[in-house]
Image (tube, grey):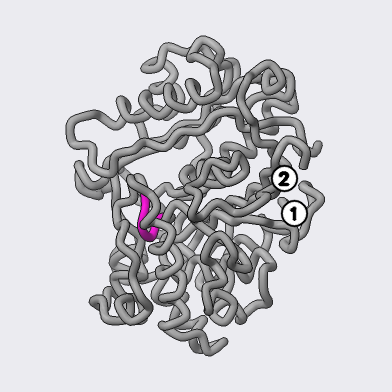
Amino acid sequence: MSIRGKAFIAGAFEHPLREIPDRSTHQVVAEVALGALADAGLSLSDVDGYFCDASLGFGPLSMVDYLGIHPTHVDSTETGGSSYVVHVGHAAEAIAAGSCSVALVAMAGRPRSTAMRRPTVDEPTPDAVFESLWGMSGAVNGYALAATRHMHEFGTTSAQLAEVKVAASLHAQHNPNAFLPKPVTVEEVLDSPMISSPLHRQDCCVVTDGGGAVVVVSPEVARQLGRTSVKVLGHGETVKHADNGRIDLTYTGAVVSGPRAFEEAGVTPADIDYASIYDSFTITVIETIEDLGFCAKGEGGRFVSDGALVAPDGRLPFNTDGGGLCNNHPSNRGGMTKIIEAVRQLRGEAHEAVQVPDCTIALAHGTGGSIGTRMGSATLILGTADA
């Protein structure tokens, strides 16, 4: 069953704060949920589907009780940072199947206020038994391994990685809520402290509190609302893992999720006017651009050079809110903000300095986990109502 045109994003809201020490994470979820519903012209009583990850209590069981809603369909798929790109696809599938008609997809996190720590568990995951003791000591290390391999195989340079950060920073200066609103140069990226060679501090995403939500509705509901809605055209998802140690670090799960989304949407990479691409680290963007088909494998470093990612006139305008590198990366789950900025672009609501002219088709891609070990990848193709 295709979801093309079977669902629309009618509401979207991103929390304006990047440090939220005075509220619980549940309160932040409620704030972004109410913001997205208000944007759509709906209320909590209209919601019959709820989608979230499992990071808060019992996931949807805890949150629907907290919000006081009574959904007939819930989903707590967990794929890390790509979870909310997955959730929009699943919401569209549920709506197409008649399981719900107004799906609320909401997330929040406060890692800056609570310190980044994982809950203790009685039994570690299979990978943790080895990797936490003998392998990588932090998230950045896996991405550094991937960057090193990409450089070895294809001649990618640190300066080319830095171009990704530069583009994001040029966009962030127009976002009043961005955590890092100051533009930077390639030289400044290369001069920043080395975190895990070859990745410098400026190659790494920000750590922020915050959250966001979107409301996915049926075509019938969309027609009744006085709001410009964004059509869901295609969706793809996959898991790429370490293959018992035989992992190829030069590609991501986007090689599977991307083609599936493009096929369902009936479009090609050449049709994409704007792209929201998960940017946990600069290497994540370069590998993802290749794997989605915007350039050949190994050409990502050269592709992003010379302002190719800079809006509004670059070959592939990306992350016009500043992305995870400069704007917002709440609870390491930046897939939600990728969707929100794609919706803004398609509605013509991005900042005028970065609004892509005649933006008709947009892509949002999420990467969860680590491109150095195992990841959940999800690709979403969105369009204007007449796309």
Q: Which x, y percent locates residue 112?
A: 23, 47
Q: Which x, y percent locates residue 151?
A: 49, 85
Q: Which x, y percent locates residue 128?
A: 36, 58
The part of the image, by quadrant, that contains residue 133 is bottom left
Left or right: where does residue 318 sit relative to residue 205?
right
Q: Residue sitting at 42 percent across and 22 percent down? A: 34
Q: Main secondary structure of the magenta part?
A: helix
Left or right: where does residue 225 sit relative to residue 306?
right
- Say whether residue 211 is magenta: no
Is 126 or 59 nearer to us in this picture? 59
Q: Is residue 158 visible?
A: yes
Q: Residue sitting at 20 percent across and 42 percent down? A: 114
Q: Which x, y percent locates residue 295?
A: 67, 74
Q: Which mark is residue 155?
A: none
Q: Earlier in the sequence, mark 2 or mark 1?
A: 2
State the residue position of label 2.
Answer: 234
Marks 1 and 2: in contact by CB < 8 Å? yes
The part of the image, by quadrant, that contains residue 19 is top left
Q: Secondary structure at mark 2?
A: strand
Q: Quadrant of the C terminus?
A: top right
> Which residues fall within the magenta stretch?
324-328
Q: Height in image: 363 above or below 21?
A: below
Q: Quadrant of the N terminus?
A: top right
Left or right: where does residue 89 sit relative to residue 58?
right
Q: Residues within 10 Å of mark 2 (few under 14, many from 20)?
A: many
Is 156 or 56 nearer to us in this picture? 156
Q: Height in image: 350 above or below 161?
A: above
Q: Residue sitting at 33 percent across and 70 percent down? A: 184
Q: Secondary structure at mark 1?
A: helix
Q: Which mark is residue 262?
A: 1
Query: What amino acid does circle 2 point to?
Result: Gly
